[in-house]
Image: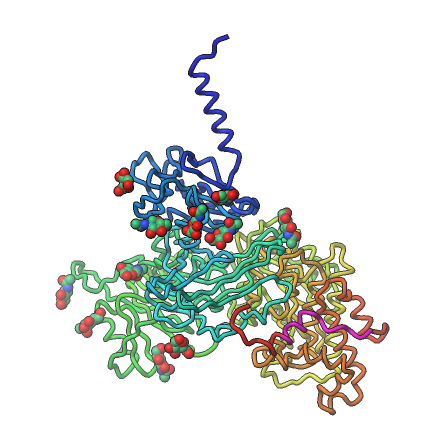
Amino acid sequence: MAISPSCVLCLLLLIFLQYQSQASDTLTANQQLSTNQKLISQDGNFALGFFKPAEGSNDKWYLGIWYNKIPTQTIVWVANRGKPIFDPVSSNLIISDDGNLVLLADHSKSPIWSTDIKNNTSISSTMAVLNNTGNLVLKHGSNNSTVLWQSFNDFTDTWLPGNKLSRNKKTGAVKRMVSWKNRGDPAPGLFSIQLDSNGSPQYILQWNSSIVYWNTGNWSGNAYTGVPELSPTNMYPNSGYTFQFVDNDVETYFTYTVKNDVQTFTRAIIDVSGLFQSLMWTNATQAWTTFFTQPTVKCSVYGVCGENSKCSENAASSCSCLMGFIEKYPDNWKLDDHTAGCRRKVPLKCGNNDSMHTKQDKFYVIDNVKLPDDAHSINAASAHACELTCLKNCSCIAYSHNGTCWVWYNHLMNLQDNIGGLRDSISIRLDASELPNSGTKKWWIIIIIIGGGGLIVLSFGVTILYFYRRRQRYKSGINHDDGALISFKYRDLQSLTRNFSERLGAGSFGSVFKGVLLDTATVAVKRLESFHQGDKQFRTEVSTIGNIHHINLIRLLGFCSEGVKRLLVYEYMPNGSLDKHLFGSSCTTLSWKMRYQIAVGIAKGLAYLHEECRDSIIHCDIKPENILLDASFVPKVADFGLAKLLGRDFSRVLTSMRGTIGYLAPEWISGEAITIKADVFSYGMVLFEIISGRRNLEHRETSMETFFPVLVARKLLEGEVNSLFGSELTNGVSVELERACKVACWCVQDSETSRPTMGKVVKILEGLVDVEMPPVPRYLNVLAEGSSSTKSSSY
Ligand SMILES: *[C@@H]1O[C@H](CO)[C@@H](O)[C@H](O)[C@H]1NC(C)=O
Ligand SMILES: *[C@@H]1O[C@H](CO)[C@@H](O)[C@H](O)[C@H]1NC(C)=O
Ligand SMILES: *[C@@H]1O[C@H](CO)[C@@H](O)[C@H](O)[C@H]1NC(C)=O
Ligand SMILES: *[C@@H]1O[C@H](CO)[C@@H](O)[C@H](O)[C@H]1NC(C)=O
Ligand SMILES: *[C@@H]1O[C@H](CO)[C@@H](O)[C@H](O)[C@H]1NC(C)=O
Ligand SMILES: *[C@@H]1O[C@H](CO)[C@@H](O)[C@H](O)[C@H]1NC(C)=O
Ligand SMILES: *[C@@H]1O[C@H](CO)[C@@H](O)[C@H](O)[C@H]1NC(C)=O
Ligand SMILES: *[C@@H]1O[C@H](CO)[C@@H](O)[C@H](O)[C@H]1NC(C)=O
Ligand SMILES: *[C@@H]1O[C@H](CO)[C@@H](O)[C@H](O)[C@H]1NC(C)=O
Ligand SMILES: *[C@@H]1O[C@H](CO)[C@@H](O)[C@H](O)[C@H]1NC(C)=O
Ligand SMILES: *[C@@H]1O[C@H](CO)[C@@H](O)[C@H](O)[C@H]1NC(C)=O
């Protein structure tokens, strides 16, 4: 039987392909990596290959490294950032004759990307290895300990454990991490992080390599002065992290490592909105959890919203175009790249003399803002003179008069919604046609006069009918305790909150506004942000929450689900949140008796959520801000069920908890599964604050010696916990005080099994069950010891 030569070739090719598809971690000189193949690190954690960004509607391909075991595409390195491949079939990665790793694409002979080592005769044969750290290393084929090139030296937007974002002291070369342009485009964006090139031991965040918008502050031997929480002593001891800041003759760098036995992935990135973040993969939620974000005020990122737009700290989409402007690049805008800003819908008339009907430009006033950068002051006695002066100069596009006349030329950058503080207003120049009640106004008047009469009569009738029905429904919703939730129209909520004018606060999930229902009942309306759930699922979850009734849980009255809008209507709590009474400037100081009752009430509410609901509900975000007080100071736990409502997007929750790491159980940090005992930990931390009347974290920043939970834990063992409090507090309440201290200590134990259930906490606090002496929690103990032995700069 004869085998034709072509068949032999087929066979060989087949064998070759099979050999190729067997994933290896090494590419040698006679091999090539094509689009459907990948290198996989020995431990299987990382993969190198060709990818198409998951987001953005494009057909652009890139060579990159990603996590091989994570379902969400997470790219940690990209070779050809700004030079996409359009024809993946004709592309491959090879080792060229001169030993370089090169990416050939789109039938082109010259490489689209190369490791670019200069011709060096000693590079006869090389090989590329993807190692377990996610580093692609080009080595000598003969002597594999010589590193010729490595991807760790070529940062994109990700900082993996073990890598160094360094400055070379001899050459002055500074490594820089640059954000992706948008979520779907790895091309270099405008934001970057690097060590200060003028030599200070600090990292800086920059816009367009020129404007610094945030820095860590100098490394002080133990932490950065601007980010004290990023210190080895502030980390949970079992988190497995080590930090190191190295400053030797050759180079300066910061590096962090994660112990091998921590079964999770950690990375730090500079994201498309200019934020520096640390993230951790959380198995429980199958999502990345953000546990560190800087700057914490996202609007302080320079130019994050581009020109002619406004940045709002508490909105889901923080950037919005000013009136009269639209997004310059809507596609990028959708992918979180707002840096190009907005453009005018209608050009200004100024300088345009060709039309006889040209009207002068007009101004549109925006109140309560933080004024944009680059203001110029000019002489003008009054606001009116200021306006006229601005009108005269075609480059002048806005003015603000606050005693001085400020004007802006050509572009507006970093206009922000003001949250507290100074309340300035700014007048934006627009073409007259862009303003309401001008131009077309007369037409409207005529239409209304002619056709309006009948319409008014008709709509009046309809409105009466409508409100009558509404009233019936409201009544049945509120008066009958049958748990029936009211399904509100968005329009109704708009009107009962007077177009969301009175904001009560901003929580983890969105802002809360005061509203009045039928002129009688006051309600709190929560506008949910960053919502990814469909209408049906939302209704299911909401009805579950609506069915939960307990005196210590806030009552859900209704909801609204319209288009992408999701709102929840709650009963209104006249005394606001617990933090205001504990730490705030509130006039009422809570007596010990009230505080103790509040602690018991919160515990009861949580016990109900954990133990008595059909599907046990983990709150995930217990902190004083989420405990509301009714008219008689009965505590009500708010926001329960929302973590679940928001689906897998726990990272949102945590991002807004930045800085409140003090309430997070260690297992959040180490990426283990979250159980109800995580709530118990947070409750313990809150209980310490209820006892002390001060923030735990506040103490921690000043000196570890006075970190309240540490003091309590120690004094309990020494049997003199009462010595912590003034005599006027301890008189007659020392039993309750000691009980509360013990409970708090038990709640913050490292091991979940040591922490009591909330049901048990209630019994102990009510004196029905005795409580043993708690051991000092290991994590608190290490914290306290760390503070007295932080001398060297490396850990
Ligand atoms: C590199 O050196 C080799 C031999 O030393 C030579 O054949 C080759 O042309 C050189 N390549 C380039 C790009 O200079
Ligand atoms: C060639 O590469 C080796 C190994 O990286 C290096 O030691 C040597 O200095 C290089 N030679 C030239 C001429 O660049
Ligand atoms: C991976 O690369 C880094 C950086 O070159 C190196 O320090 C480390 O030893 C390598 N790990 C392995 C497993 O080769
Ligand atoms: C490196 O080369 C040595 C011999 O030169 C060999 O024993 C070793 O297995 C090689 N290591 C790798 C990772 O290829
Ligand atoms: C491999 O290279 C390293 C450093 O470049 C050198 O110290 C070592 O002696 C070399 N080993 C061999 C077997 O050539
Ligand atoms: C940071 O360190 C540099 C030099 O190391 C020094 O010049 C600078 O003043 C320091 N900055 C602050 C705020 O202390
Ligand atoms: C960034 O800076 C470069 C010059 O360094 C300039 O050409 C470019 O226009 C700047 N980009 C923006 C968006 O201003
Ligand atoms: C428009 O008219 C003004 C004065 O009437 C003149 O100063 C200006 O140069 C003219 N602009 C253009 C673009 O023609
Ligand atoms: C108009 O504004 C520009 C700044 O962009 C300034 O240079 C110019 O002098 C101004 N013109 C007048 C007439 O004030
Ligand atoms: C007016 O606005 C400018 C620019 O924002 C600010 O520097 C100044 O303090 C303000 N003056 C008053 C009186 O508010
Ligand atoms: C997370 O899941 C991966 C894969 O299922 C597993 O290997 C790892 O041990 C898990 N980590 C934790 C902390 O459960």
Q: Quadrant of the C terminus?
A: bottom right
- The residue closer to the viewer here, 699 or 487, is 699
Colour treatment of the image: rainbow
Inspect this view and state whether residue 482 appears. Answer: yes
In the image as oriented, which residue stretches furthest toward the bottom?
A: 727
Residue 592 at x, y = what percent? 73, 83
Residue 281 at x, y = what percent? 58, 54
In the image as oriented, which residue stretches furthest toward the top?
A: 1
- Is 191 placed left or right of 243 in the picture? left
Does the magenta segment cover residue 778? yes
- Is 503 placed left or right of 435 in the picture? right
Residue located at (72% from left, 77% from top): 713
Hey, which quadrant is residue 600 in on the image?
bottom right
- The residue closer to the viewer here, 414 or 352, is 414
Tell me the magenta residue range.
Answer: 772-785
Inspect this view and state whether residue 47 appears. Answer: no
Residue 754 at x, y = what percent? 76, 65
Residue 311 at x, y = what percent? 42, 65
Residue located at (50% from left, 74% from top): 221
Hey, which quadrant is residue 546 in on the image?
bottom right
Hey, which quadrant is residue 507 in on the image?
bottom right
- The residue closer to the viewer here, 372 or 567, is 372
Q: Is residue 696 above or below residue 135?
A: below
